[in-house]
Image (cartoon, rainbow, N blue to C red):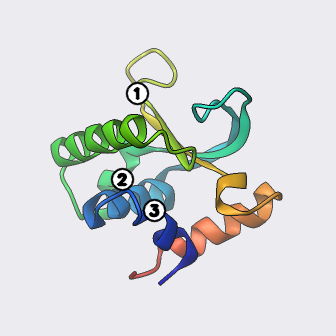
Amino acid sequence: MNKITEKLATIFTEKQIQVLKDAWRYGAWGDSDVNFGRDEDDWGLGACTNDAKTGGHFTGRQISGIMSGISKKIEATHTDMIANFPDWWGDGTGDMVFFNTRAFGYENSDEFWDVLNVWSKSND
């Protein structure tokens, strides 16, 4: 099992992980300082969850529901692996999910970007 999937599978379901993969594969956006629920911001790599629909695994309505479940699990577990931000730009154009570079054991965001690209295409 891929290292990313292995960590995410401790909290999230297969469907939730597939939406996260699709969001990254089709909506990878960039990096930013992000508050992952801790005192300090960490470096995160973000993807637009609206683009997960392009993966063809789920409808837009299903993705919305699955992302709602992801948000609830983030809050319930206080995980710092990912953070979800509905309406990131404040204009209704997109929700974002960020992956915490350090929580997955990477200091270099470029290296982590490459790892996420491979992970998003994997079948595990």
Mark before the other along the chain sequence, 1 or 2 = 2
* Front-most of residues 39 and 108: 39
Q: Residue at x 34, y 64 (%)?
A: 18
In this orientation, does residue 21 appear?
A: yes
Seen from the viewer's position, the closer of residues 94 and 119 is 119
Q: Decide which of tag 1 and tag 3 comes sooner along the chain.
A: 3
Quarter holding the C terminus is bottom left
**Mark 3, secondary structure of its residue:** helix
User: Sequence-wise, which precedes: disc 2 or disc 3?
Assistant: 3
| Res. 120 visible in picture | no
Q: Nearer the viewer, residue 75 or 112?
A: 75
Where is mark 3, residue-wise? 8
**Residue 86 marker:** 1
- The image shows residue 25, relative to residue 70, as above or below, that is below
Q: Which residue corresponds to the image point at 24% horizontal and 64% vertical from the top-left?
A: 57
Q: Position of residue 33 (x, y in %)?
A: 72, 33
Q: In the orientation shown, which residue stands out farthest toward the front?
A: 77
Task: State the CA–CA distance, disc 1 to disc 2.
Answer: 14 Å
Q: Residues within 10 Å of mark 1 (few under 14, many from 20)?
A: some
